[in-house]
Amino acid sequence: MNFEEHAGKAVLRGAGLPVPQGRVCHSPEEAAETARAIGPVVVKAQVPTGKRGKSGGVKLVDTPEAAADAARAILGMDINGHKVGKVLVEEKAGIAREFYAAVLLDTANRSPLVLFSTEGGMEIEEVAASRPDALKRLNVDSTKGFSEADAKALIQGLDLGDAADQVAAMLAGLYKVWEQRDAELVEVNPLALLSDGRVVALDCKLTVDDSSLYRQTDIAPQGAEEPMTALEKRGKDAGLKYIELDGNVGVLANGAGLTMTTMDVIQRFGGRPANFLEIGGEAYTKGTEALSLVLSNPGVKALVVNFCGAFARTDVMAQGVINAWKELKPTLPVFFSIHGTGEEEAIRLVRQELGIEPFDLMEDAVRHAVEAAQ
Ligand code: GDP
Ligand code: MN
């Protein structure tokens, strides 16, 4: 789940980290009122996406009237497909330097990764590509954590002057937030050194692991739901994890692992999967809805059905798909591969009920589907 800047900053504030004071506003009048109370402010679009600065979604103003004008201009804007419904009105900070700080899950190294750069404000990917030495990285042993002393060691020699201690405290604090909030990402860009010497988080991007929301109940309501397509909503309502993709080969497999393997093999043969769909072993009870979802994607030109049975029986899954097939009567080409518990009966059923010969190898089923979809 993504948290917009204001919600992310509230989490940082709750952890004792310095963020500017401000208020979420839904109208120009509210923005003016807030500016009257605070003084010069920055008015920022609140949408779960970055690059708002470049899109005109961040405006610095000095008077309540100008704050109202800025809010009027930003509210209703479309930024990366997100319609702006609220703005964050915050005290305007006098920026001396912009840094970059982040803690994220480094899946390749199976550990948290702390990032820091003195080249903040801009795209960190550009910094990483053009000046890799300007980006400090540290993979953290999560059993030991990341202390302020560790942070000091990481930023040593970076010429941060008097700000070094505050930066170190911020980095250690961000790590704590990352850990305690089950975050996938906490990113502060820019982490600003103000002209008065304070170091504050001027922006915040927070992503929390969806699987942990049940124990992040105090902040979960402030999160922004990931935008879903109509088909994805339908899948969710049916209790299925469906993700719509832009390929042309539909995938129906039991289990997330086998589904992703099938997607990889589709790509291996030069094709593009049209969906991810997790049906687990419930192909029998949810077969019709699952098949209907996969086929409702207008991009689908061929279908791979890949079953591998262990505890879940493939003959039961096959029967579920056959029932669904007879109900929906699709006309597109379908290619089966069935292995594991119940496979003999499953293969016999598909042959007899659908007149289709399953492939012995998954590769063959996938290759034929990729070709048929072209
Ligand atoms: P993003 O573009 O969506 O990442 O939005 P940011 O919150 O990072 O804002 C973009 C840029 O606006 C920052 O890099 C700053 O340069 C500038 N900015 C944001 N807040 C302030 C502020 O309070 N004072 C000043 N002077 N600039 C700000
Ligand atoms: Mn930013």
Image: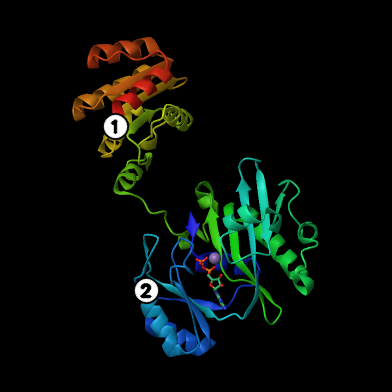
Residue located beneath label 1 in the image: 291
Q: Quadrant of ligand 2?
A: bottom right
Question: Residue sitting at 32 percent across and 29 percent down?
Answer: 285
The earlier-in-sequence mark between 1 and 2 is: 2
Residue 27 seen in the current view = no
Q: Secondary structure at mark 1?
A: helix
Which quadrant of the structure image shows residue 176? bottom right
Q: Is residue 66 above or below residue 209?
A: below
Q: Which label is found at residue 75?
A: 2
User: Relative to residue 79, is residue 119 drawn left or right?
Assistant: right
Q: Quadrant of the C terminus?
A: top left
Figure coloring: rainbow
Tell which tag, 1 or 2, sits nearer the viewer: 2
Residue 225: quadrant of the picture: bottom left
Q: What residue appears at the point 33 percent right and 47 percent down from the top-left corner?
A: 233
Drawn side of residue 351 relative to residue 40, left or right: left
Q: Residue 206 appears in which quarter of the rendering?
A: bottom right
- Residue 129 in the image: x percent, y percent? 61, 52
Report the Cα–Cα distance between label 1 and label 2: 41 Å
Tag 1–tag 2 contact (CB < 8 Å): no
Crowding near the residue tagged with mark 1, few <14, some 14–19, many ≥20 C-alpha atoms within 10 Å = many
Residue at the location (37% across, 20% down)? 365
Q: Give the label on residue 117, or none.
A: none
Please report the residue visible at 35 percent of the width from the left and 17 percent of the height from the top: 315
Q: Can residue 166 be seen in the rendering of this structure? A: yes
Q: Name the element at disc 2.
A: loop
